């Protein structure tokens, strides 16, 4: 399928995608706050700058976009245009993520990955149980 946008427009559209305060992130943060959990955001001193940090528990939550972090779900598709660039970019993200998770573990931290698609399901009960079990 041919892209409906010019390369310049596509580049601009992709550059506008946020890395912080995304909708999946705000869904999780609102639930955590309403449930009485207190946390820090985007803690720069930790590998990977986790989205949500619980310093006293030594636990972090990453809320990953399915496309950007190569989740095997319906939201991930390899782009047809410029495939070499996207393969390098996305595989690089996956490798960097793995290295950051290992660094966290080696420093005594636990991590949980929440995928974008998990925050879009109509029944979020499973996600909340997953988070509660992790923070337990």
Image (cartoon, rainbow, N blue to C red):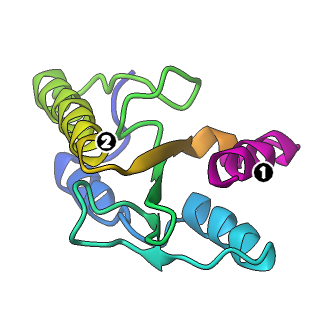
**Side (left or right) of 127 relative to 60:** right
Single out the mark in the foreground, 1 or 2: 2
x and y percent of residue 83 in the render?
A: 18, 23
Residue labelled with disc 1: 128
Dividing the picture into quarters, in which one does residue 86 lie?
top left
On residue 53, the disc is none
Residue 112 drawn above or below residue 36:
above
Residue 82 drawn above or below residue 40:
above
Dividing the picture into quarters, in which one does residue 42 lie?
bottom left
- Dot 1 or dot 2: first in sequence order is 2
Residue labelled with disc 2: 105
Q: Residues within 10 Å of mark 1 (few under 14, many from 20)?
A: some
x and y percent of residue 54 in the render?
A: 50, 68
Q: Residue at x 35, y 41 (%)?
A: 68
Q: Residue at x 21, y 44 (%)?
A: 103
Q: Is mark 1 on a helix, strand or loop?
A: helix
Question: Which span is picked out in magenta?
Answer: 119-136
């Amino acid at each position: 399928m041919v892209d409906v946008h010019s390369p310049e427009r596509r580049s601009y559209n992709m550059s506008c995608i946020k890395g912080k305060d995304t909708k999946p992130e705000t869904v999780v943060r609102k639930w955590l706050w309403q449930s009485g959990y207190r946390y820090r955001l985007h803690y720069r001193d930790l590998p990977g700058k986790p989205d949500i940090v619980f310093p006293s528990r030594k636990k972090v939550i990453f809320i990953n976009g399915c496309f950007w972090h190569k989740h095997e779900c319906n939201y991930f598709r390899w782009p047809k245009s410029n495939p070499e660039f996207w393969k390098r970019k996305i595989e690089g993200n996956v490798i960097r993520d793995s290295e950051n998770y290992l660094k966290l573990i080696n420093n005594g931290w636990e991590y949980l990955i929440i995928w974008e698609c998990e925050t879009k399901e109509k029944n979020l009960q499973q996600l909340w149980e997953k988070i509660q079990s992790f923070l337990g």
